[in-house]
């Protein structure tokens, strides 16, 4: 049986791979640029959207860093985050674990606390008014050097209680996880949980490095792990969750057709797969769009959809009581739909 859009929307879901700066819709970009007196080199929202044609990760990142450049004040980060939370709530997201890229802002003169305060206040208001719980994951930009990441970790330590984990993003190939071993060790010693993008464009060896050298609790993307049977077996045995992003993979040409997307093969291999939006404003869809596109392209069954929703909750860092409640709700919905 197929899962309807409405059934998928109503399933409690956690989103575990969302770059908050990647949820920056052109409408809000224009609004913020206008109030900050910053020029955007496009005439209209439509012209911005039309520029979102990417051939690989780097061609996207160039536009992504340019887009975030209009954000200067705490209020900008608040508005960005609140807009995402509303949109996620509409898709039935009950819990979200948000990446942010502090170096994308401190590198152009915006203070770390300006970024963090804006995001943090929105997360608190979002929990109160929308009922969405959340965790924050601070990502290091892997195209920069490790000393820059170490300085960023030092800045974050003043706000240790607001940050749950550290991640690794930006240009993958040529910047293997091992480049960041020291900063990840320090972060883990401070009690932060580690995750890393690996195997989006990089080889299976990068996924192994993320596991062995960074000791990550989850792998973000992980597509190319499927090239190594030994690695697939290890990911399954160790129950390492993968935060997979189908529409992102399509837009960044990681796959040329969604029908070739590895999500279904990952499920068949017994991997703990989750579905996420990555950078929804740039890739043409939020989490529900990713579920429905994957369902249609890969002919996913209602059981597959339920498994994906269960995985998202189980792989999250939400508090245990809530997790058990959401899992029970998913099971009740699955039982009622048979
Ligand atoms: N991959 C790597 N870095 C990123 C991405 C991504 O999909 N989105 C934002 N930063
Ligand atoms: Zn990502």
Image (tube, grey):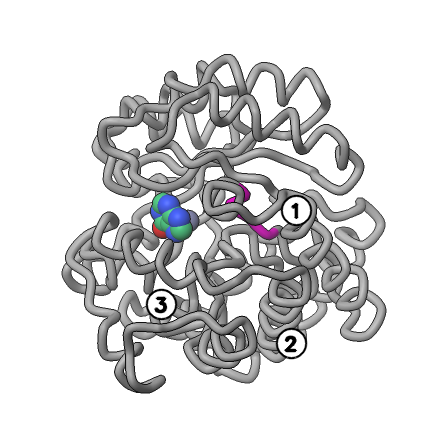
Residue at point 28%, 22% (across, down):
205
Give whichever of 162, 300 is nearer the camera.
162
Which residue in the protein does label 3 denote? 282
Residue 302 position in % (x across, y down): 48, 70
Q: Spatial distance from mark 3 to mark 2, Cα to Cα?
A: 17 Å
Residue drawn at (52%, 20%), measured in percent from left and top? 215
Percent x, y for residue 165?
63, 35
- The quadrant in which residue 177 appears is top left
Residue at 71% over, 20% down: 190
- Circle 1 crowding by C-alpha within 10 Å: few under 14, some 14–19, many from 20: many
Looking at the picture, tell me which residue is in the foreground, 98 or 276.
98
Per the rendering, the mark at residue 136 is 1
Instruction: Identify the secondary structure beneath mark 2.
Output: helix
x, y percent for residue 198: 36, 35
**Sequence-earlier tag: 1 or 3:** 1
Q: Residues within 10 Å of mark 3 (few under 14, many from 20)?
A: many
- Where the N terminus falls, by quadrant? bottom left
Q: Compared with residue 213, is residue 264 higher up or lower down, i.e. above or below?
A: below
Which residue matches tag 2?
A: 86
Look at the image and tell me whether residue 338 can be seen.
no
Q: Main secondary structure of the magenta part?
A: strand
Disc 2 and disc 1 in contact, CB within 8 angstroms: no
Which quadrant holds the C terminus?
bottom right
Q: Is residue 49 above or below residue 188?
A: below
Q: Which residues are magenta?
A: 98-102
Q: Nearer the viewer, residue 58 or 88?
A: 58
Q: Nearer the viewer, residue 119 or 254?
A: 119
Image point (38%, 17%), residue name: 178
**What mark, if any, has residue 336 been given in the picture?**
none
- Is residue 198 shown to the viewer in this render? yes
């Amino acid at each position: 049986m197929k899962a309807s859009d409405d059934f998928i929307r109503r399933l409690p879901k956690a989103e575990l791979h969302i770059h908050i700066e990647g949820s920056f819709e052109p409408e809000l970009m224009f609004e913020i640029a206008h109030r900050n007196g910053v020029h955007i080199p496009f005439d209209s929202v439509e012209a911005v959207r039309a520029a979102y044609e990417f051939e690989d990760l780097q061609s996207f990142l160039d536009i992504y860093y340019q887009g975030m450049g209009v954000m200067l004040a705490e209020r900008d980060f608040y508005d960005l985050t609140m807009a995402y939370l509303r949109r996620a709530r509409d898709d039935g997201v009950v819990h979200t674990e948000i990446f942010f890229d502090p170096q994308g802002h401190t590198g152009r003169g915006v203070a770390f606390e300006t970024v963090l305060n804006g995001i943090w206040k929105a997360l608190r208001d979002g929990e109160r008014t929308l009922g969405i719980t959340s965790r924050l994951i601070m990502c290091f930009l892997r195209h920069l050097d490790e000393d820059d990441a170490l300085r960023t970790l030092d800045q974050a330590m003043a706000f240790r209680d607001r940050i749950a984990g550290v991640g690794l993003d930006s240009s993958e190939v040529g910047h293997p996880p091992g480049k960041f071993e020291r900063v990840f060790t320090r972060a883990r010693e401070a009690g932060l949980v580690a995750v890393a993008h690996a195997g989006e464009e990089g080889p299976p060896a990068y996924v192994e490095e993320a596991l062995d050298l960074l000791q990550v609790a989850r792998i973000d993307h992980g597509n190319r792990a499927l090239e190594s049977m030994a690695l697939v077996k290890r990911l399954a045995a160790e129950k390492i969750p993968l935060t997979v992003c189908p529409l992102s993979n399509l837009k960044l040409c990681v796959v040329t057709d969604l029908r070739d997307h590895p999500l279904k093969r990952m499920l068949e291999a017994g991997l703990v797969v989750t579905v996420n939006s990555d950078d929804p404003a740039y890739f043409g869809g939020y989490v529900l769009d990713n579920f429905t596109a994957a369902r249609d392209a890969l002919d996913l069954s209602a059981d597959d959809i339920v498994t994906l929703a269960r995985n998202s909750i189980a792989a999250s860092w939400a508090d245990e009581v809530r997790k058990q409640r959401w899992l029970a709700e998913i099971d009740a919905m699955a039982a009622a739909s048979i």
